Amino acid sequence: MRRKLFAVVLAVAAVSGLAAGCGGSDPNVLKVGTEGTYAPFSFQGPDGQLTGYDVEVVQAVAGKLGKRVEFVQTPWDAIFAGLESKRFDLVANQVTVNPDRDRKYSLSQPYTTSDGVIVTRADKTGVTTLADLNGKVCAQSSTSNWSRVASDAGCEVEAVEGFVQAIQLLKNGRVDATVNDTLAVGEYTKTTGDSGVKVSGRTGETSHQAFAARKESSALTSDVNDALNALRADGTLARISDKYFGTDVSK
């Protein structure tokens, strides 16, 4: 009886030890939060696999760090909450650098540079500048940088989950415009051929996008920056950029 009891105790201890080991973080894994619905940066390819510019860049970064990537798909409006709650180590989803985010998070050096555009229905006139958005309604992801741009211009923001939903509301006549990245808008019109919307103007703002980590993870950000420098030097960033955009947006 005592031998049986001792065996049970050993078994329980072994299971407990295994559970504890599984609960620890793997130093060889970089957990990355991304939407998976924001083409051409992070989306599902024809084979159902996660792909896109941001996906390939962060995979290349992880390769330089000797790590493999584990993606955690998360809606944009919950992505920073996921980072803060330690669901993942890094956000790779076209995080636009701005003073507020710089205060809250540890941001890498930029790996994308782009401009903002205003999108309206094809038959819409009179909206060509940010000033024209004053008093209008814009469909935006509420926590995005473009939402702030639209709001600052006097546009009432209708919150949406992503760019595709914004376009749907726009075409249905429920909003007047949406403001977004010229690269994302270009990808949408190229892949869909949608003639129901148009780029009606530019915001006049150049934005820079970076990876975001928690503020206490500055060592990780430093390693990411070293990897980005190496990927620039060996031409990898330019190659990935050319694959998705036909030009180098990583400069």
Image (tube, rainbow, N blue to C red):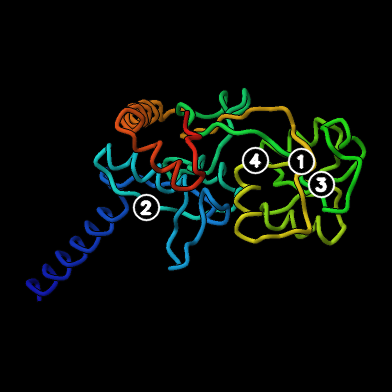
Quadrant (top left/top right/bottom left/bottom right) for the N terminus: bottom left
Q: Residues within 10 Å of mark 1 (few under 14, many from 20)?
A: many
What secondary structure is marked by label 3? loop
At 11% from the left and 70% from the top, the residue drawn is 7
Q: Amino acid at mark 2?
A: Glu
Which label's residue is closer to the chain start, 1 or 3?
1
What secondary structure is marked by label 2? strand
Which label's residue is closer to the chain start, 1 or 4?
1
Q: Amino acid at mark 3?
A: Ala
Nearest-to-viewer mark from 2 and 1: 1
Real-space Cα distance between discs 4 and 2? 26 Å
Q: Is residue 45 above or below residue 197?
A: below
Real-space Cα distance between discs 2 and 1? 34 Å
Contact (Cβ within 8 Å) of mark 1 with mark 4: no
Q: Which residue is mark 1?
A: 118
At 66% from the left and 40% from the top, the residue drawn is 144
Real-space Cα distance between discs 1 and 4? 9 Å
Q: Which residue is mark 2?
A: 70
Image position of 59 (left or right of 200): left
At 52% from the left and 48% from the top, the residue drawn is 41
Q: Amino acid at mark 1?
A: Ile
Contact (Cβ within 8 Å) of mark 1 with mark 3: yes
Which label's residue is closer to the chain start, 3 or 2?
2
From the top left corner, tell me how far across and down residue 40 is, in percent.
54, 51
Nearest-to-viewer mark from 3 and 2: 3
What secondary structure is marked by label 1? strand
Q: Which residue is mark 3?
A: 177
